[in-house]
């Protein structure tokens, strides 16, 4: 799961390079921060000593994934990306 989310970070950075300049501190930044948050939370959670804490970090990671998905939809709706 962590390895796949690292791949998503690369995809996000590559994709947002083509976004308009005015999105740099808005959608571009938000998408990349969400993407980085996914593997970061998995990694941080794996260092915790209890399963309860690990689960909480996995839930945070899932929340970031859903945020990123929403921002992906916004990017598509704004014409910044296509379905390819």
Image (cartoon, rainbow, N blue to C red):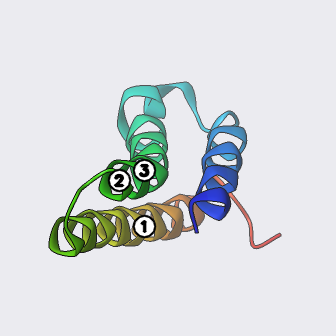
Disc 2/disc 1 C-alpha distance (Å): 11 Å
Identify which residue is drawn at 53% across, 58% down: 75
The image's mark for residue 41 is 2
In the rendered image, which residue does mark 3 sit on?
43
The image's mark for residue 65 is 1
Q: Residues within 10 Å of mark 2 (few under 14, many from 20)?
A: many
* Any part of residue 40 in sight: yes
Identify which residue is drawn at 25% across, 55% down: 48
Question: Do callouts 2 and 1 mark residues in contact (Cβ within 8 Å)?
Answer: no
**Nearer the observer, disc 2 or disc 3?**
3
Q: Residues within 10 Å of mark 1 (few under 14, many from 20)?
A: many
For label 2, the SS is helix
* Any part of residue 79 in sight: no
* Of pointers 1 and 3, the one earlier in the residue sequence: 3
Q: Is residue 54 left or right of residue 52?
A: right
Question: Do callouts 2 and 3 mark residues in contact (Cβ within 8 Å)?
Answer: yes
For label 1, the SS is helix
Q: Nearer the viewer, residue 13 or 48?
A: 48
For label 3, the SS is helix
**Nearer the observer, disc 1 or disc 3?**
3
- Which quadrant of the view contains residue 76? bottom right
Q: Is residue 78 left or right of residue 10?
A: left
Disc 1/disc 3 C-alpha distance (Å): 15 Å
Disc 2/disc 3 C-alpha distance (Å): 5 Å
**Nearer the observer, disc 2 or disc 1?**
2
Q: Nearer the viewer, residue 78 or 18?
A: 18
């Amino acid at each position: 799961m962590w390895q796949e989310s690292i791949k998503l970070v690369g995809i996000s950075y590559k994709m947002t390079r083509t976004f308009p300049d005015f999105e740099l501190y808005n959608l571009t930044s938000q998408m990349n921060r969400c993407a980085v948050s996914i593997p970061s939370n998995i990694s941080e959670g794996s260092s915790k000593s209890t399963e309860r804490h690990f689960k909480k970090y996995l839930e945070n990671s899932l929340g970031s994934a859903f945020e990123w998905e929403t921002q992906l939809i916004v990017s598509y709706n704004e014409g910044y990306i296509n379905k390819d």
